[in-house]
Amino acid sequence: MRLTRRMILGALLAGAADVALAKVPDGTIRPRRRGDGAVRAAATPVAQIVEAARLDGAVSFVVADAVTGEVLEAFQPNLPQPPASTAKALTTLYGIDKLGLSHRFVTQVVGTGPIINGRLEGDLILVGGGDPGLDTRALGAMAKQLKRDGLREVAGHFRLHNKALPEIYEIDPEQPDHVAYNPGVGALNLNYNRVHFEWKRAGTGYEVGMGAPAVGYAPEIAFSTMEVVDRSAPIYTLVTTDTRDAWTVAKTALGSGGSRWLPVRKPALYTGEVFQTVVQSLGIMMQGAILPAQSAEGTVLARHESAPLSEILKDMLEYSTNATAEIVGLSASSKAFGASVPGLRQSAALMNDWLNDGAGPRGAVLTDHSGLGDDSRISAADMARAMVLSGYDGELRQLMKPFRVVDDNSIKVDAKTGTLNFVSALTGYVARPGRTPLAFAIFCSDVERREALAMEQRERPEGGRAWLGRARTLQRRLLRRWATIALG
């Protein structure tokens, strides 16, 4: 079933499902009639299950009939909670509606003059179309196309056109500088906007490299630099200029050798440098500084099309890629707005309006499209409502990852997880043989404890793993309860 604008904008938080999900009371599942008699759904009160989880902070959830929207069980359903990466489920709906599942992002190489005897008499422009999955191999394929078509030299400048989307320095400024899940994003993106940092011991010091590796390619990067510094803390520092991401790393943290991905803050320059390096490695002369392009007009010399949006969204939901979510959301907002939106908060506001149209003061208040930001909030009732209105047979569930909670293979759960420090969320669907399917949302958070973390504690906070384990145990217990009792 195709999710349409009418279904979402006209029905989300309104209509038949709204009747079932509006003003959801706390409570336990009512007895449901099955066969010749009534079967009581659950002997254990839900409040007792929550208390047994020993989970500091707040817990809220809603489970509903996925067809009618009738609420079957709820606990603090109207409490606004951080959605973490379950926000990507809403971004998926937004992207489907505004872009369509068959949408492909296009990256092009454009020449502004004729090619005479292998020499381009003009500029060469790399034009970004917002492809979130562009990688070094794709750049290599376009470079090889130029080579096959006889290009040997660029007389003009090499330029970048990245005006299709705003270039965002980072998704969430409250994250540590070095975490790869918080990169910049824009119209030109590469390798999920991560640079590969590798080091090995050499005498009393270290040899380090910054690159963009892929199968058949190992370009080194000058845009992103690394200096090993004799200190114990902080482990990483970053200073960004118009032309550089300048990193330092504490020598005491490196050991004998290793590697990790670091975020890129200027994705267009990063993409441009890798493309220029690959082109030059094929013997095509293209010298000089990388410059901006004011226009993308010219002759298309090479192009790369992304996978269809359906595949991009499926990967995003499985791997919870923040960069992909933000790029899809920005692209959807730009399509709806008719022009590039100024930034993430403005784009998220457009998505909020789309989600909450007709909802009055209720509904989602998201500050980005990935759920990484601290200030995003949504209630379990509103998230469950979105799952119901998307439809059990709709496109969202089919893109979600299977989530195993019981040994019975006939019980199927398709869901999106969400995890931040002291935040754990889960939303999706439960299929049970011979019974109505369910839609649900479960949110657990200790916002006060999260907000108390210093920046250096945020990558691995003390007590975070244990808290997350208890939250996930509670989620699985609730799912097993809903999957196996006589409900619906």
Image: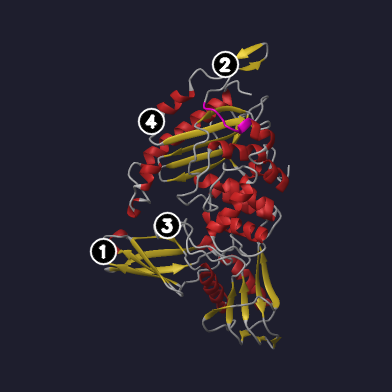
Residue 22 painted magenta: yes
Q: Is residue 319 left or right of residue 457?
A: right
Does label 3 or label 2 sit earlier along the sequence?
2
Residue that label 1 marks = 231
Q: Amino acid at mark 2?
A: Arg
Total numbered circles: 4
Q: Is residue 374 left or right of residue 455?
A: right
Label 1 with label 3: CB-CB less than 8 Å: no
Quadrant in which the N terminus appears: top right
Question: Is residue 217 at least partly visible in the picture?
Answer: yes
Does label 3 or label 4 sit earlier along the sequence?
4
Q: Image quadrant of residue 400?
A: top right
Q: Secondary structure at mark 4?
A: loop
Circle 1 crowding by C-alpha within 10 Å: few under 14, some 14–19, many from 20:
few
Circle 2 crowding by C-alpha within 10 Å: few under 14, some 14–19, many from 20:
some
Q: From the viewer's perspective, is the residue at label 1 or at label 4 nearer? A: 4
User: Picture coordinates of residue 68 (x, y %)?
Assistant: 68, 30
- In space, the residues marked 1 and 2 are separated at their CA atoms by 63 Å
Location of residue 69 with respect to 375 vertically, above or below: above
Q: Secondary structure at mark 1?
A: loop
Q: Which residues are magenta?
A: 20-26
Residue that label 3 marks = 179
Q: Image quadrant of residue 102?
A: bottom right
User: Picture coordinates of residue 239 (x, y %)?
Assistant: 38, 69
Residue that label 4 marks = 54
Q: Is residue 458 left or right of residue 339?
A: left
Q: Amino acid at mark 4?
A: Arg
Residue 81 painted magenta: no
